[in-house]
Structure formats: C-alpha cells, structure tokens
Image: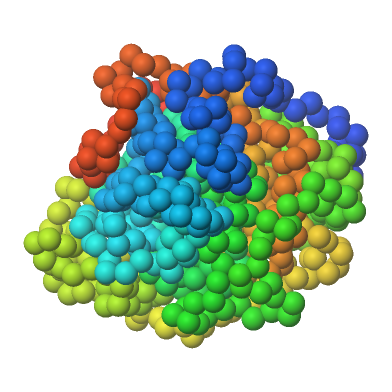
Amino acid sequence: MECQKASNPRRSGLRAALGIVAAVVLTAALTPTVVRPIEAQAGPLYGDPLVTVAGLDLQKVTIPQLEAAMAAGKLTSHQLTQAYLKRIAFFDHGCVKVNAVRTLTDDVMAQADAADAARKAGQTGPLLGIPIMLKDNIDTTDADTTAGSIALAGNRPPHDSFLAAQLRAAGAVILAKTNLSEFANWMSEGMPNGFSSLGGQVVNPYTQGDPSGSSSGSGAGGTLAYAAAAFGTETSGSVLSPSAANSMVGIKPTLGVVSRAGIIPLAHSYDTAGPIARDVTDAAVLLTAVSATDPADSVFLEATGSTPLGHDYTKALNATALHGARIGYSPGDVSGLSTDEQAVFTQALNDMAAAGATLVPFDTLSDTSPGGLTELGGIPSEFKFGIKDYLANDAGPAGPHGRPVLLTDDLTGIVVYNQQHASQIPYGQSLLIASDATSGATLDDPSSVATIEGARANIDTAFSQNNLTAYVGPNADYANIGAAADYPSIDVPIGYTNGGTTPMGVQLLGQAWSEPTLIGLAYSYEHATHRRIPATVADPTLVQTTCAAAVVPDAVSPTLLAPAGIAVAGASLGRRRRLPRRRQPHRG
C-alpha cells in the first residue's frame, strides 16, 4: 500500500543541493510556466456558457459576495441553486464524464426557497441560501450516505452529522453528495483514486485523469463550480491532495476543530473533515461555520494556546500576512521535481519572498516526512472498530427501503456482502479483509499513540529550531506527517504544468491550532498572485456541446438528476485520459 512513498528519490543528495537550489530560489533563476490572468482569456466567460448568474462569475465570486448580492435583492437562493444544478447537468456527464456528484439531496429546491423566505422575513446568516456539497461519507437526513459502497447503498441516516447541522444553522443549502474513493480509499491496493463500487470513477476536469483521493468528487465538482464550495474528509492527505490536483483551496484542520460525529470513519485517531473551496476566503467562511463544541465527539487535541472552537477564521484574511513570516522548505523538494514543476514551485517560493517572507531552507523535516507512513499501522484496527460503531449508532435501518441487510452489522458483514456481489467490486477488497482480521482497536491503540507523538515531535522540533511560521512543500507532499501529528495544513493553487493543463498546489503546514496563521499566509499568497484558472480554460473540451448529455436546460428539477442518473457504476473516464503524474492514493 502506498500513501506517501517510504523511499523517495527526492530525498537523496539533499544537502549537496542545498546551496545551489537556495540560490536559484532567491534569485528567481527558474522561469515559471506562464499563466495568463483570467481576464486575458477569451472573454469573461472563458468559453463557459453557464458561468454567470445575475452578472456574477461563479468561478470567481466569493461566498460573502453572494451573500451581499442576495441581501441587495440582486440574486435569490433559488436562482443560485438552479445555476449550480445546470452546471451539474451540463458537465458531470457531458463530453467529459467528470462524475463528481453521486446524488442530490431530496429537498434541494425546498431548502433554497426556505432560505429566500427567511431572508424576506429579516433573517441573516453567513451561509444563508448558499449551496454546499458534502462528501458521501458525511451524514444528512435528506440524502443517502454510502461511502461509495454497494454494501451501504440506500443508507439513510436518521440524523444529520454535526457538520451538516452546523451548516444548516448557518443557513446553507445542502445541495449534493459527492463521489469519493470507496471507504475513503480503504478498499484495495489497486483501486484507482476516485473509484467506488457505487459511484463509479471520478475524473479530474483538468487532466481527464487522476482526480486524487479520497475526496475526489469534492475537488473535481468544486473546481467546476457545482456549488459555492464543498467539504471533504481526511485521514492522511484526502483534503489536501484532491485540492492540489483540482486547483482548489483545501484546509485540513487540527484534530478537534471540526466534529467527526455522523461521519463514516476510517481511523478515529486521525480523521477530520475540512473545506474545499475555490478561494481562501470561502474556505475560511466554511471552517468558521462548522467549528463548534460537540459533546458527542469528546476527543480533542490538547495543546497550549489552542484556538477556541467557534473562532471566526475570516478575521485571519490578511493580505500582508506573509510580511515578516519565516517559511521553511526543503531544497530537495525543488531538485526532485520535473523541470516545469520546479519552475512553478520555485515561482511560488519567490512570490512568498517578494511578499516579505523569509525563506528558511533546511532538510531535517523532509528527512522525517516518511515517518507519517507509520500511521497506516493503526488504520486497519481503527477502521474495524469505527465501522461497527457507525452501523450501531449512526446508520439508517436495514431493509427493503433502507440499506442492505448484512450478515452481521460490522465489517465482517460488509466483506461477506461484497463477496456475494463480487462482480461489482472490480478491484477487490483486500484492505477490508485485512482490517477485518484485526482485533478492532479502541482509542488506546498503541500504534496510533506512538505515531502521533513521534510526528508531533518531528514537526515541533523543526519549527522551534528554525523559528518557523509555517513550512511549505509542493502539492500535498507533507500530508502524511501532518496528518500523523493531527496538525493543520492548507493547500493553495500555485500554477500549472504540462503546457498549462495540470494543476499544482503548495501545502502550508503548521503546528497545532495554527489555522488562523495558515489562513492568513494562504490569503496573502493568493492575494499577491491569483494563480488559479478554471478547468474550462485548461481544457476547452469541457464546454463542447456536441454530446447528447451536454444540453443546457432552462431550469433543472432535482428529479432530472435523480441518484440513478448520477451514480453510474464504472462510469467512463472520458474520451481521453492524461496521466502525467499519478497522485498518491491518500486516505480519508
């Protein structure tokens, strides 16, 4: 199994390259891939026939701007929701079968109309009338929650997850459930990122290839503006990596910032949900909305100076946050990249320096980053424990109108059900079988405790010895060690390789509870660079209207996008498939 490779050729000869690469970074000797501003592309629509509503560009507008437009009477939630439904109808099974959405919620338009009525009655809210998508392992009462598994098809939870309840309290419209790598990429070694037996294959809109996992649909659908933003979950890299792969902003919070109650678990020692958005502002808005104390999830990371739950992360949106920051990085990360990847990542470092940051080159943290792989030792038994607990306490009833009746309501029952329907799980279930053979650990799993303590020590030592504000790496290369420590990261788009077609991101890693700092740095970088471009610019075939499915309706009823029409098992990867660099199969 591979999460991050334990043996990485990038790490060889690091110190020998230190002085040379540091000089390259500081003198901008490498030339980045040229990315034209969006405004310089062919018109404001960049070939996208459905990108505007009420004069607002859905690829660029922020959630606060949408709220302002609705408050001013220029836009309704009904109109906005219809606009997103049209985009799903047009793109998800069009010329390129992105297949990001598994199902819509039953009452999506009723939610939107209720939000409009509430606004007319004088109510306000940070997300009032804003459509949001959730990964299909996050419970809601108005859509099934399946983790992509045929063994959980039809699972209708009796209660919202705490996260979904917080979004509704803020006024959000829960629009859809997104496809994912089955059981958060814990099905089998050979299963591609973004595949599930129930939902089929998610496709990266930029490359028509690997969408990264496991929050694949949230990344792919989010980048095509199927909703204002989305949520994913991460055990090790599954918010950060799909964000990098699909040119999105993703926040993996410190364990304890977001409640895990009502989310199908992978490993309770590491699991967390996190926002995936097209800009840092929206990611901060979403994290603010869902961060709150939940008595049902009592396991929180204890750390001195922790950020209070319910903190307003939008206060950290500071355009000058990079000024005076000390940003660590490994020169070996630069030398180990391809030529065009080097150019993009080096430009990002130079941009941070130009914004006032001090770059601090050293390799001790990169040398220990494979240590994050040891967290995988605790996942099998924690997964067995968590699935049994979920089926007992959170899942909907089994039967003709619910989820399948299993031999036993635990992982064994799921394994047996899959064996009885083997033709529907083409990549097998080796990880499920291995997990079922364990004892089923509780919160005191020694493997996880040792992993967490070791990862925290590695990160904390690197930060204290180098007096760092944050540490950066390309894409999500430090997701494993950050996740193993339960520490936060944020990933931000930095450019494109392979002729402008393949997104690249930068991961900003921090210490416990440093979300405000990381959000400020990411916003400052985004404000200075504006690197993100829509997928329709990178690949114009996305907006071709020659396919039968690519029809722009005047209005969309959720019944036209019924679950059977969205969840296409084994969905096509599209007319062509470019895989210039396979993303690691991140978990969670």
Quick check: 173 above or below 407? above
Quick check: 219 above or below 368? above
Front residue of 305/470: it is: 305
Residue 28 horizontal/vertical position (percent) = 86, 32
Colour pattern: rainbow
From this viewpoint, which residue is outermost toward the bottom?
Answer: 444
From this viewpoint, which residue is outermost toward the front?
Answer: 121
Q: Residue at x 55, y 20 (%)?
A: 46
Q: Residue at x 43, y 69 (%)?
A: 162
* Residue 276 appearing in the image: yes
From this viewpoint, which residue is outermost toward the left?
Answer: 400
Left or right of residue 164, residue 396 in this image: left
Q: Residue at x 73, y 52 (%)?
A: 317
Quick check: 294 above or below 553? below
* Residue 179 appearing in the image: no
Quick check: 327 above or below 499? below
Front residue of 151/559: it is: 559
Residue 226 horizontal/vertical position (percent) = 43, 38
Front residue of 404/463: it is: 404
Front residue of 460/298: it is: 298
Residue 534 horizontal/vertical position (percent) = 56, 29
Left or right of residue 518, residue 438 in this image: left
Task: Name the quadrant of the N terminus.
Answer: bottom left
Say how many tags the image has: 0
Q: Residue at x 68, y 33 (%)?
A: 531
Left or right of residue 170, residue 195 in this image: left
